[in-house]
Structures are given as structure tokens and as C-alpha cells.
Amino acid sequence: MPRFYAGDEVQRLVPQYLEELGVEYIDLILLHHPEGFGPFGRCANGTTTECRANAWAQLSALRARGLVRHIGVSNHGVRQIEQLNALNLAPVAANQIQYNPWAPE
């Protein structure tokens, strides 16, 4: 959620997840939903774009350390992916898009 995009949340949470899972690395982590969901999804420390860039930088650093193999996004549009690629950090490895008979097109 975007509420975890700012500050050092990513640097704090990923090692916690590794310990909880009992693994040395995570194959793929997705940065979910590029915008906020009401009051619980809004980024508190800057614009959504700034917070997304901060989270991507943190995930890229974890990837460089070998704690994460690939990083991707979920429900991001072309504009948001281009913004992440323009950071010249880790490439966007995947974009998970909801697609099922009940999802609006």
C-alpha cells in the first residue's frame, strides 16, 4: 500500500519478511497500487510520485544487496512505469494487472 512507500518502511519491512519466511531472499516483490486508497492509502511524506520513487529506490537497494531478486509493480499504468524506469535504478520486472470476468475493463 502507498502508506508504506515513504520513510524507511521498505528497508525495515523486507528483512522482517525474510525472517518470518525463513528465507535468504525473496524472488519478487511488487509495489502495489500507484495511487492511494482513501485515508489509509495516501502517502504521508510527499506526493504519491515522490513516495513511489522513494520506495523504488529502497527496493532497488535491497535488490543490489541480494535480498530481493526482482522488483515489480501492480496495477501501474504506463506513465508510472516510465517514471520508475527514469530513476535509472532496478528495472521493472513485472506489472501484475487484475484481469478476470468480474474486473472492470
Image (cartoon, helix red, strand yellow):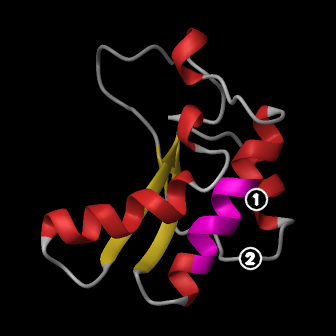
Cα separation between marks 2 and 1: 8 Å
Q: Is residue 50 above or below residue 60?
A: above
- x, y (%) of residue 90? 66, 77
Q: Secondary structure at mark 1?
A: helix
Depth order, front residue of 94/87: 87
Q: Please provide the residue range marked out in magenta.
A: 54-61
Residue in the picture at 25% in, 85% down: 24
Residue 38 circle label: none
- x, y (%) of residue 83? 83, 54
Residue in the picture at 29% in, 19% down: 101
Residue in the picture at 40% in, 33% down: 98
Q: Is residue 87 above or below residue 84?
A: below
- x, y (%) of residue 84? 76, 59
Asked whether residue 33 is in view, the answer is: no
* Magenta stretch, overall SS: helix
Residue type pointed to by label 2: Leu
Residue 53: image quadrant is bottom right
Q: Secondary structure at mark 2?
A: loop
Q: Is residue 61 above or below residue 104?
A: below
Asked whether residue 76 is in view, the answer is: yes
Residue type pointed to by label 1: Leu
Marks 2 and 1 in Cβ contact (< 8 Å): yes
Residue 55: image quadrant is bottom right
Report the side of 75 relative to 90 (left or right). Answer: left
Residue 89 circle label: 2
- x, y (%) of residue 68? 42, 77
Residue in the picture at 86% in, 65% down: 86
Residue neighbourhood size for the residue with mark 2, other residues' Cα within 10 Å, grouped as few (<14), some (14–19), many (≥20) = some
Residue 84 circle label: 1
Residue neighbourhood size for the residue with mark 1, other residues' Cα within 10 Å, grouped as few (<14), some (14–19), many (≥20) = many
